[in-house]
Amino acid sequence: MVSKVVFGRGSFNQLEEILLLKRLNVNAPFIFLVDEVFQGNDKITSRIPLAYEDEVIFISAKEEPKTCQVDALVEYIILKFKDRPSGIIGIGGGTLLDLSKAVSIMLTNEGEAQDYQGWDLVKNPAIYHVGIPTISGTGAEVSRTAVLTGPEKKLGINSDYTPFDQVVLDPELIDNVPTPQWFFTGMDCYIHCIESLNGTYLNAFSQSYGEKALELCREVFLGDHLNTQAAQDKLMMASWHGGMSIAYSQVGIAHAMSYGLSYLLGTKHGIGNCIVFDRLEEFYPEGVKEFKAMKSKFNIDLPQGLCKDLSDKEFNIMIDVALSMVPLWENALGKNWNKTITREKLRSIYEIM
Amino acid sequence: MVSKVVFGRGSFNQLEEILLLKRLNVNAPFIFLVDEVFQGNDKITSRIPLAYEDEVIFISAKEEPKTCQVDALVEYIILKFKDRPSGIIGIGGGTLLDLSKAVSIMLTNEGEAQDYQGWDLVKNPAIYHVGIPTISGTGAEVSRTAVLTGPEKKLGINSDYTPFDQVVLDPELIDNVPTPQWFFTGMDCYIHCIESLNGTYLNAFSQSYGEKALELCREVFLGDHLNTQAAQDKLMMASWHGGMSIAYSQVGIAHAMSYGLSYLLGTKHGIGNCIVFDRLEEFYPEGVKEFKAMKSKFNIDLPQGLCKDLSDKEFNIMIDVALSMVPLWENALGKNWNKTITREKLRSIYEIM
């Protein structure tokens, strides 16, 4: 689990104090991986505490994070600096947070990031890493995974060394997120809850986190009484609790199928989940109904016809990726999941997206 | 925060596997501090994984944990074993968990436990320590404090090094707790929630944890639909969430005054909180009303007349201890708390207990 967390509006200002004690020496920089939407945004960049060799690297989150991107960042850091960094600080959404987790791991582990996609393959502790979400919903700030698209698969680096050593939860930072992105990312959390709470892996630990996250999502996306600040605070906590819920259970069908979309078409995770979940009435009837109500409340249009021109080969690639997510299917439908979920069944669902 | 947690009925059996990777060498034992109620209880003791020099020390939880008890345990361990232990494993309720946290800290920090009562006074990381609750409510399994009664005060060792490195939440272990003890300890959690949720320090982080814990307490102590196992599971999670809630806010009046009772009369924390909270209608009207309903549902009789024969000097000792808990009063009543809370006011409340 995350070792330390601070929460509060304006808590981003505590970053300098937090890092002060963690600097190894003047040659060991802090590397800030920051979503490029903040480039030129003084309100954020002027508050990043830089000293000595510290460096800010702006990174686009337009595409899902890739193993090769991690390897390139690690190579750049190793070649440029005399000493191993004092720490990696990720500032952004799930993409930046997962990249930061993966870079911090690959600075102390040999080989390439793709070698560690899976469960508990990481051998050495990562370097100190801090996560600062600027958009809420993915749960990446609290999870023990760093989801990456590799040459062969989209799969997380799941390990005890993946979680952040420190998280700064400052709800002010999620101000100004464009509504569609805010919605799609928030729905990642909502879908986590539905998948976790309706899963066969559920236990009282996950249930208590999932129920709280779901309640907060409903307040934010269906309620009428919250002011902007309260909605930001609550969404940030929903993401946290939703992440904790799936960390101790598992996600389900929407995530399995959405991984197929991402892998083949590069569809971003949040919107991909929404596109898939929208078609899963058969499996999550109440959740999908409520999702459609939220979509309608915020006038969200989902892309249509994503799969209409795909070839058989392309469908098969998506189906292979989705079917490889065995724990997700098992969580959703139990041990005999593959009696219900055939290739034809999956294709029929993908075809209407 | 706690670095790792496992949850589940029977998860106590994972302890051997968990400790396997943490043994430093054959001369560095694991020391198990275990509530003496389990002495002779094969169902528990036979599952404690012992090897090499490992030792089980049974400790009575009849009295609140003391700084001198911590110092004696540390001295015993240092004199008996060649190497510093591989870890301390606490198995029991709040008393055993707090003792284990404190011993693990004092094995790496000079001086006496009383030197570290306060906030952030601990200099060196504690040795590896594991918490395994066998009764639920205190939140000691998740908190960053180890509350001890010292020669001068009852106050916690609050530090970043206090939380457990690993927690094992096995709801089976809270089977067979006698009803009054189960109730008093559970009410510690309920009172945490009321104090946190009604406090001026409240933020969305603490609120989300406190609300969930409160909801779970209500299911356990007021609901009619839970079977025994579900009630155990939910109470264990209530304690966890309640502990998280106060870790990021603060407790209030019941705790401040209960510390006075404990210090002077040795009243155990859980029952002391109940005795005080029962008299706090003025400050927490709804919470106290609900508490009385739970008390009545389980036919709980609280001791009466605890303070009827106390001298002025004794009242003053309790009042001094209670008044010294400044953050608790400030959380409960705001910065001007001492306009409402005079010595006379406190005495009048203590007098009816």
Image (cartoon, coloured by chain):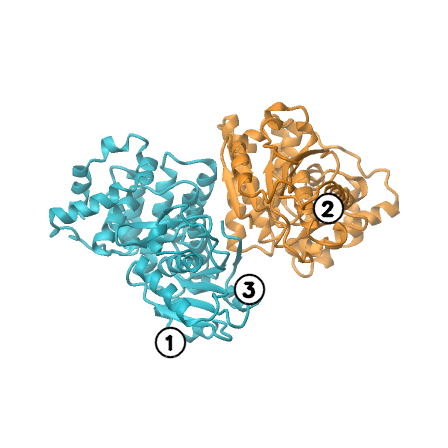
Chain colours: A orange, B cyan
- Mark 2 → mark 1, Cα distance in angstroms: 51 Å
In the image, which disc is placed on residue B22?
3
Q: Quadrant of residue A307?
A: top right
Q: Position of residue A235 (x, y in %)?
A: 55, 35
Q: Same chain for the residues at labels 3 and 2, yes or no?
A: no
Q: Which quadrant holds the C terminus of chain A?
A: top right
Q: Nearer the viewer, residue A192 or B299?
A: A192
Determine whether, in the image, residue A185 is placed left or right of residue B81.
right
Q: Which residue is mark 1?
A: B40
Count numbered badges in the picture: 3
Q: Is residue B76 above or below residue B167?
A: below
- Mark 1 → mark 3, Cα distance in angstroms: 27 Å
Q: Which residue is mark 2?
A: A148
Give the amino acid at mark 2: Leu
Q: Quadrant of residue B60?
A: bottom left
Element under disc 3: loop
- Mark 3 → mark 2, Cα distance in angstroms: 30 Å
Element under disc 1: loop
Give the amino acid at mark 3: Lys
